[in-house]
Image (tube, rainbow, N blue to C red):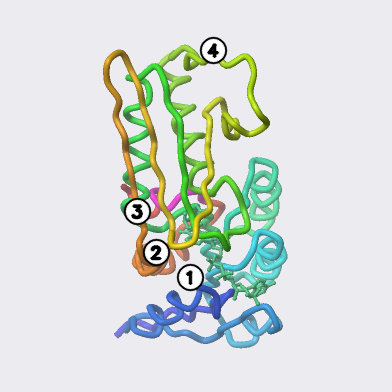
Amino acid sequence: MAQRIAVGVLGARGKVGSQVCAAVDAADDLELVAEVDEDDDPRLLVERGAAVAVDFTHPDAVMGHLELCLAHGVHAVVGTTGFDDARLAALRAQVEQRPGVGVLVAPNFSIGALLMMRFAAEAAPHYESVEIVELHHPTKADAPSGTARRTAELVAAARREAGSPPAPDATSTALDGARGADVDGVPVHAVRLRGLVAHQEVLLGGSGETLTIRHDSFDRSSFAPGVLAAVRAIGDRPGLTVGLEHLLEL
Ligand SMILES: NC(=O)C1=CN([C@@H]2O[C@H](COP(=O)(O)OP(=O)(O)OC[C@H]3O[C@@H](n4cnc5c(N)ncnc54)[C@H](OP(=O)(O)O)[C@@H]3O)[C@@H](O)[C@H]2O)C=CC1
Ligand SMILES: O=C(O)C1=N[C@H](C(=O)O)C[C@H](O)C1
C-alpha cells in the first residue's frame, strides 16, 4: 500500500474540524498526526510531520496558520472563511514565495453547494434580477458567508461576460441594510437563526417568472468528503487554488 498522507487539523475541536478529524481517522490512506485547537501550539503540526494541514478555525487566526504552513512546506486545505480580494492577493504573494507548496481556499466543500454556484452562474445572464439569501446558525462569525460572496462574484462575472445590464431597482429610500450587502453589484442578504446549519438561495427573476436555486447543508458531514478529496489532491497542485471545483475538475 502507498504511504499514508500525514494530516494535521487546525480547529480540531470545532464543529467542522471535529468531523474532519473523524473522517481522516476513518480513511485508510490518511493518518491524523496532529489535532490543534485554540489553546494548542500550532507548531505541533510541523513537529508531528504533517504533510497537509486542514484549517477550520476563525477568520482572525487562519492567516497566521498559513504563514506557518508555508514556512515549513506544509500543503494547506482551508475551509475557514473571511477571504476577501485583499486577503487573497496577500496570500497569493506569500504562496508565490514558496514554490511547490499547494494551498486551497474553498468557501464550501459540499458537492451540492459547488453545483449551486455553478448553476447560479449559468442561469444569471438569462434573468433581469439576481439576489442571494444565505441562512446560517447564529454562532457564525462572518457575514455574508464565504459561499454567498463567491456565488455573487461568479454570478457578477457571468453577467459581465454576457453583457447583462444592471438589475432593475427603483429603491430611492431605505433603512440601512434593507437591500442587503452589495457584493460585485449583487444584493446579498444574511439570516442568522437558531436551528439552521448552512443554507443558501439564489433568486433569479425575469418577465413573469422566477427561478430559485437552493442548497441546504443539514449536517456538517456534508463537508467531509470534499475536504478529504482536497487533502488527497493538494500535494499535486502547487500554488494558490480558490474553489474546490478546480481540484475535482467539476
Ligand atoms: N468551507 C466550508 O465548506 C466551510 C467553512 N466553514 C468555516 O470554517 C470556520 C470554522 O467553522 P466552525 O467549525 O463552524 O466553527 P467553530 O467555532 O465550531 O470551530 C472553530 C474551532 O477553531 C478553534 N480556534 C479558534 N481560533 C483558533 C486558533 N487560533 N488556533 C486553533 N484553533 C482555533 C475554535 O476554538 P474556540 O471554540 O475555543 O474558540 C474552535 O474549536 C468558519 O470560518 C466557517 O465559516 C464552516 C463550514 C464549512
Ligand atoms: O460557518 C459556516 O457554518 C459555514 N461557512 C461557510 C461559508 O461561510 O460559506 C460554508 C458553509 O456555508 C458553512
Amino acid under disc 3: Asp
Q: Which residue is mark 2?
A: 223
Q: Residues within 10 Å of mark 3 (few under 14, many from 20)?
A: some
Q: Secondary structure at mark 3?
A: strand
- Does the stretch in magenta take in 244? yes
| Contact check, label 2 and label 1, Cβ < 8 Å | yes
Q: Find residue 116 and report its horizontal and vertical position in percent.
A: 34, 43
The earlier-in-sequence mark between 4 and 2 is 4
Which residue corresponds to the image point at 67% horizontal and 44% vertical from the top-left?
Answer: 89
Q: CA distance from mark 3 to mark 2?
A: 12 Å
Q: Say whether marks 1 and 3 touch (CB < 8 Å).
A: no
In the picture of the structure, the residue carrying the numbered disc 4 is 170
Q: Which residues are magenta?
A: 241-246
Residue at (70% x, 70% y) in the render = 68
* Foreground pick, 205 / 45: 205
Residue at 38% x, 32% y is 203
Depth check: give the residue in front, 86 or 248.
86
At a point 68% along the width and 48% down the height, the residue shown is 87
Q: Which residue is mark 3?
A: 216
Question: Which of the labelled discs sits on residue 16, or is there none?
Answer: 1
Q: Earlier in the sequence, mark 4 or mark 3?
A: 4
Q: Nearer the viewer, mark 1 or mark 3?
A: 3
Q: Position of residue 152 (x, y in %)?
A: 49, 35
Relative to 34, is 68 above or below?
above
CB at disc 2 and ligand 1 closer than 8 Å: yes
